[in-house]
């Protein structure tokens, strides 16, 4: 594992599994010493359901760890991996709060793990099949040339990151769009039909976007917020180019 942030997400997933196991075990115990046959039937049913869920989640958690260790995709583990991420994630957020950690810390860890899992898949596509999706707050707040309808409306003044990102767009030939929220982001994805996405946003929007667009591969790049969230944000253009090149087929 590369750093503490990546471990954080996996540790919370593991603690969530332990909590489910404890609940399932407690129900199994109660049904053994149950008072009435009806109670025993209900508790047995609940314990069987929880045990099946626990096995699936445990397989998914183990799949994530195994793929990260081996650094290669394992096709038959994709489904349990997705189920573990999709359904353990809300419980992991609850666990983070319970142990006094911020939701933002967990989301950053989740994005790092997700990026690594996408990178391990070794996806290679043409520029025309890649969508770079940007938040509208990356444009200067008082700029009168709005780019939400068409990023080419940018006048390339260099006061925000869009100018340099347009340079990358011209260099690599990918699609680039700006979204004001999840609804517009989904509209761009539906219209462009990319095979992969590099998305820029805050931790919360990236995490929800990655989950919403599954199984479409998404690499998330967390934005820079020198003036706070949702206004005059930016992004490291070098990090963007690295994320873009991880997807693109290269002739050199």
Image (tube, rainbow, N blue to C red):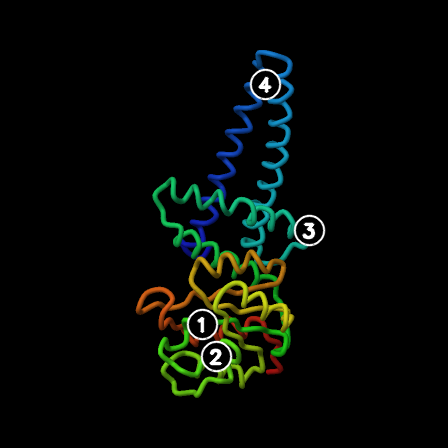
Label ID, residue 147: 2
| Marks 4 and 1 in Cβ contact (< 8 Å) | no
| Marks 4 and 3 in Cβ contact (< 8 Å) | no
Q: Is 52 left, or right, of 141 in this rendering? A: right
| Marks 2 and 1 in Cβ contact (< 8 Å) | yes
Label ID, residue 31: 4
Disc 2 packing (10 Å; few <14; some 14–19; many ≥20): some
Residue at 58% x, 82% y is 173
Residue at 60% x, 68% y is 189
Whether residue 209 is situated above or below residue 86 in the rendered picture = below
**First of labels 3, 2 by sequence position:** 3
Q: Nearer the viewer, mark 3 or mark 1?
A: 1
| Marks 3 and 2 in Cβ contact (< 8 Å) | no
> What is the spatial separation of the Cα atoms under label 4 and label 1, in whole angstroms?
55 Å
As drawn, which residue projects farthest toward the left? 227
| Marks 2 and 4 in Cβ contact (< 8 Å) | no
Q: Secondary structure at mark 2?
A: loop
> What is the spatial separation of the Cα atoms under label 4 and label 3, in whole angstroms?
35 Å
Mark 1 highlights which residue?
136
Q: Secondary structure at mark 4?
A: helix
Mark 3 highlights which residue?
76
Q: Nearer the viewer, mark 4 or mark 3?
A: 4
In which quarter of the view is residue 25 placed? top right
Whether residue 165 is situated above or below residue 72 in the rendered picture = below
Tell me the quarter of the image containing the C terminus. bottom right
């Amino acid at each position: 594992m590369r750093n503490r942030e990546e471990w954080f997400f996996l540790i919370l997933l593991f603690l969530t599994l332990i909590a489910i196991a404890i609940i399932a075990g407690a129900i199994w115990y109660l049904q053994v010493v149950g008072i009435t046959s009806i109670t025993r039937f209900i508790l047995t049913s609940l314990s069987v359901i929880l045990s099946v869920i626990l096995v699936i989640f445990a397989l998914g958690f183990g799949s994530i760890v195994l793929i990260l260790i081996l650094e290669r995709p394992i096709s038959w583990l994709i489904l349990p991996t997705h189920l573990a991420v999709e359904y353990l994630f809300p419980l992991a957020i609850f666990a983070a709060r319970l142990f006094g950690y911020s939701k933002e810390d967990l989301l950053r860890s989740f994005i790092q793990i997700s990026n690594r899992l996408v990178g391990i898949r070794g996806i290679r596509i043409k520029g025309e099949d890649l969508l770079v999706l940007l938040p509208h707050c990356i444009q200067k707040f008082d700029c009168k040339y709005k780019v939400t309808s068409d990023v080419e409306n940018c006048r390339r003044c260099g006061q925000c990151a869009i100018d340099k990102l347009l340079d990358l767009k011209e260099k690599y030939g990918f699609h680039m769009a700006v979204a004001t929220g999840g609804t517009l982001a989904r509209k761009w994805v539906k219209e462009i039909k990319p095979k992969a996405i590099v998305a820029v946003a805050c931790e919360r929007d990236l995490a929800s976007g990655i989950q919403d667009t599954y199984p479409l591969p998404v690499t998330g790049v967390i934005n820079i917020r020198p003036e706070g969230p949702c206004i005059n944000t930016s992004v490291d253009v070098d990090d963007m180019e690295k994320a873009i090149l991880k997807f693109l087929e290269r002739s050199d």
